[in-house]
Amino acid sequence: MDAGLKRELEAKVNAGERLSREDGIALYECDDLVWLGKLAHQVRTEKNGDRVMFNVNRHLNLTNVCSASCAYCSFQRKPGEKDAYTMRIHEAVEKAKEMEDEQLTELHIVNGLHPTLPWKYYPKVLRELKGALPGVKLKAFTATEIQWFEKISGLPADEILDELIDAGLESLTGGGAEIFDWEVRQHIVDHATHWEDWSRIHRLAHSKGLRTPSTMLYGHIEEPRHRVDHVMRLRELQDETGGFTVFIPLRYQHDFVDSADGKIRNRLQARTKMASPAESLKTFAVSRLMFDNVPHVKCFWVMHGLSVAQLSLNFGVDDLDGSVVEYKITHDADSYGTPNTMHREDLLNLIWDAGFQPVERNTKYEVVREYDKPTPLAERRAVPQQVWA
Ligand code: SF4
């Protein structure tokens, strides 16, 4: 990128002017990662200071049986496969209860589109979970699952959401978004929920007072222009509803050989590479600059590793997810050593070591607890620093 264009973009960002599609594409073409990071960090600091939010949550996948076969997905199983599973309601509750003494504040629940489970299973499981863990907020179901519930129940999303909210639902999850552009989407997505329905369901959720996350799956067959288009659609919807709390760029994961059965399930494997750390940092930075009306940008460290998660805090990110004790969808596809367990203390040290102030939040981004500011770097140099894998 030439110096003139850099100055032009800096001036726009400094003036708080909204960046255009062309600006977004130009930012992705720029290889000056330090400059991109500086610009994104400026915006992130204006919005969130030196705070890094996190929450202590648990991911729960009630079933991995799915009627769809999305090309990138290594999680789904077909009925009868030997490691297909579906939890009974009491099993889900027992699993959640195991975490009680970790003071979790959120359960994050996503599932396959099970072909025969009745719709009533889902509000029932929420109700039981809420009864067993009343202090824990339930963030559950993608827009894809909500549309699936419409199909299996014959009810409109309006009634589905009302019943789920009555049973304890406090937020949808942001999944099912992948990349909205049809040029790419038709090759990677097998379920029926595309932009029109994904946005319809989130709009409806926002109108009922729920605030929801938004996501983007990147680093597969899409091009930077598709990422820009994706963010611009979400930005427009955010102008309308103001209901998105956060944007989460999710790094597509290669499917290594599944140790359980020796299979490679990801059908994009031969055509793709995973995004490099530099590409991930650029994606965080451009997302922060383009998505000017969303309060937070999150790094889901499970998909990036801890070093990139730390660096991302200087590239527009101000939110780390979370204390994840079990996360199946990524870890079925991950054999390069990302830990699958982080506890509160680990996260605090990770954030302090990166030079930021940790703030624990709940699902609604309300502050649960503010922690100390980090020790200034000059003072910390006397102490050996941890190397984060
Ligand atoms: S991404 Fe979701 S809908 Fe698609 S196959 Fe996997 S579990 Fe099913």
Image (spheres, rainbow, N blue to C red):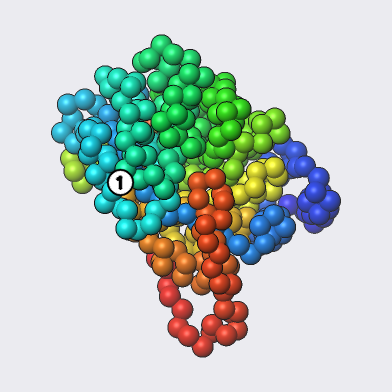
| x and y, in percent, of residue 361 in the image | 52, 54
Viewer-side residue, 51 vs 124: 124
Viewer-side residue, 176 vs 156: 156
Q: In the visual, does 40 lie left or right of 222?
A: right
Position above or below: 373 against 384 = above
Please count the marks in the image: 1
Q: Secondary structure at mark 1?
A: helix
Residue at position x 49%, y 37% in the image: 171
**Residue extending furthest toward the top:** 154
The verdict on label 1 being within 8 Å of ligand 1 is no
Q: In the visual, does 270 lie left or right of 371?
A: left
Residue at position x 37%, y 49% in the image: 58
| x and y, in percent, of residue 22 in the image | 74, 38
Residue 279 visible from this viewpoint: no
User: Callout 1 environment at 10 Å: few (<14), some (14 to 19), or many (20+)?
Assistant: some
- On-image quarter of the C terminus: bottom left
Position above or below: 26 against 2 = above
Residue 368 visible from this viewpoint: yes
Name the kind of residue labelled 1 in the image. Ala
Q: Quadrant of residue 86?
A: top left
- Which quarter of the rendered image does ligand 1 occupy? top left
| x and y, in percent, of residue 27 in the image | 69, 48
| x and y, in percent, of residue 310 in the image | 51, 63
